[in-house]
Amino acid sequence: MKRLTALFMALFMGLMPGVRAEEAALTLTPAQDCWTAQLFAMDTFMQLTVYDPSLPQQDLAEVMDNVLRLEKLLSATEPTSEVSALNASWGAVQPVSSDTRTLLQTALAVSAETQGAFDVTAFPLVKAWGFTQSAYRVPQQDELTELLEQVDYRKVLISDEGVLLPEGMQIDLGGIGKGYTGDVVMQALREKGVTSALMSLGGNIAVLGRKTDGSLWKIAVRDPQDTTQNIGYVQVEETNVVTSGGYERYFEDEDGNIWWHIIDPETGYPARNGLLSVTVIGPGGARCDALSTALFVMGTDEAMAYLRGQTEVDAILIDETGRLIMTSGLRDRFTLMGANANREIVWIE
Ligand code: ADP
Ligand code: MG
């Protein structure tokens, strides 16, 4: 059956040269108690489950249109995107859409709040390591030293007219865009009257309300040392659960070193500061997404200090020894699973 569907899809797309493959790849599947929408976008498999079978299919399609709209605006690797236009606009004020403006403002706010651990201008470094085209390489120190001069979020200026990027600088919303997309989709669902939904966008989960039986959602947290296993799960409602992990995208060089896609904007090298994964739980998917990247860069001690000083989000840090470090807000909401039942947990009070 699946093979037949694929065949029909291929024929259909072949007959319709105007339909781009990624647009045609949206599937909407009704079931007794829900709708499921699946889409490959932003380099990630996305799945949205809406617990409202009476929602018109057209409404669900409209909700999912947001994902493709945002991808076209925000992709730093798509030459026709708004971000690419911005990255080529050096020294001149570039007008931007309200989505790009809102997201860039959040990105700059988190960049400032984390003192550049998240830095929206890290794109030249991300490119140098080959993460944008999966053409991985280890850059020379000289090259990184030179590129580091083009990395500084404080030099990005936003005004009513648009965004001003100094010569040589380039932005990348890859560490925050999926979180924002979750926010936009959840808001679109709310406006359609939906009260219960779950969306997964790679390492990001966004949930709307509770499950229809009134219980909390159970969201699994993966073991970064064995990604086929879950360490445990959190029980949540109306929130985001966003994970940044070295295991999401990485390569091994000739000497057997592992380099992953989260870069420390201070050194230009992939961040290796004691952590293997960071999960952030809280309101605002965009903020949580940027924060998960930032805490990963900060490393164990700095991330713990940051989390101690705030009450807005909860977090789960997993370090290189497999130790779990969590904010105390999760005491009644996190459960260890299976073989991990006896793992040590360090609580951040
Ligand atoms: P994922 O995309 O796997 O969910 P993240 O949310 O942590 O993971 O985002 C990683 C992406 O963010 C990288 O692929 C890169 O585009 C960008 N990035 C890497 N390092 C930084 C950084 N220090 N600050 C901001 N963005 C970064
Ligand atoms: Mg992130």
Image (cartoon, helix red, strand yellow):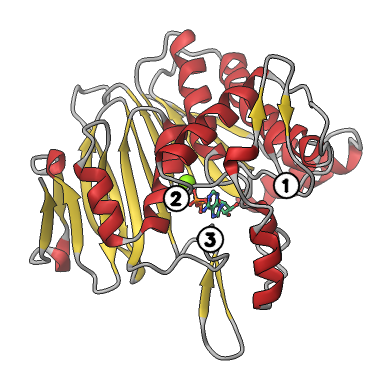
Q: Count of labels shown?
A: 3
**Circle 3 is placed at which residue position?**
263
Q: Is residue 104 left or right of residue 288?
A: right
Q: Secondary structure at mark 1?
A: loop
**Circle 1 is placed at which residue position?**
169
Amino acid type shown at disc 1: Met
Q: Is residue 222 left or right of residue 271?
A: left
Q: Badge 2 local density, few (<14 within 10 Å), some, or many (20+)?
A: many
Percent position (x, y) of residue 324? 19, 60
Percent position (x, y) of residue 214? 19, 22
Q: Give the residue displayed 66% in from the left and 68% down from the top.
A: 144
Which of the pair 191/164 is nearer the observer?
A: 164
The quadrant holding residue 276 is bottom left
**Circle 2 is placed at which residue position?**
293
Would residue 129 be seen by someone viewing this image from the given angle?
no
Q: Give the residue displayed 58% in from the left and 39% down from the top.
A: 154
